[in-house]
């Protein structure tokens, strides 16, 4: 994995050790990166980040579709992503792709 992909992952606090890394690139330029963790019966999107210059070009959608395909092949029944309620754009993005809001998380600051 190249420096461009690592830089994008660093933006969302993820690393290659967190799961399978998927990269979308064109002509050597990294357009987006995703990290998928497979743990049947569920799979989880650990990270999904697109270069700001290529947002709204289908890169994120392509990554999520491939993650869903890999999760199905691995025998997972569900693909999950954890989001902050305050981030409207990611909530809308995943809703458009058919993700359903299924639970609430509670955090205790330490």
Image: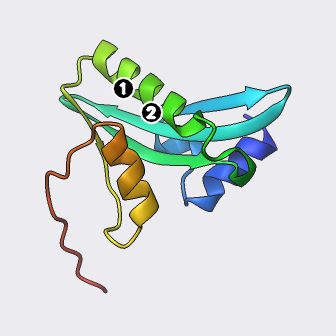
Indicate the secondary structure of the residue bearing disc 2: helix
Classify residue 29 as left or right of residue 16: right
- Residue at 57% across / 30% down in the picture? 22
- Residue at the farthest right position: 27
Where residue 31 appears, x then y in whole percent? Answer: 71, 38
Are circles 2 and 1 on residues that touch, CB within 8 Å? yes
- Residue at 72% across / 34% down in the picture? 1
Q: Quadrant of residue 72?
A: top left
Q: Which residue is mark 1?
A: 68
- Residue at 78% across / 27% down in the picture? 26
* Label 2, residues with CA under 10 Å away: few <14, some 14-19, many ≥20: many
In the image, residue 97 sits, relative to residue 68, either above or below, namely below
Q: Which residue is mark 2?
A: 64
Indicate the secondary structure of the residue bearing disc 1: helix
- Residue at 42% across / 48% down in the picture? 93
- State the CA–CA distance, disc 2 to disc 1: 6 Å
The one nearer the camera, 101 or 15, is: 101
Where residue 32 appears, x then y in whole percent? Answer: 64, 40
């Amino acid at each position: 994995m190249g420096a461009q992909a690592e830089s994008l992952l660093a933006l969302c606090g993820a690393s290659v050790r967190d799961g399978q890394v998927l990269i979308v690139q064109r002509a050597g330029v990294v357009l987006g990166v995703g990290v998928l963790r497979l743990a049947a019966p569920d799979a989880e999107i650990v990270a999904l980040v697109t270069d700001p210059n290529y947002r709204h070009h289908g890169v994120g959608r392509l990554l999520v579709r491939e993650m869903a395909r890999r999760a199905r092949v691995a025998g997972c029944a569900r693909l999950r992503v954890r989001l902050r309620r305050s981030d409207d754009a990611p909530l809308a993005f995943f809703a458009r792709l058919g993700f359903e809001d299924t639970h609430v998380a509670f955090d205790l600051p330490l």
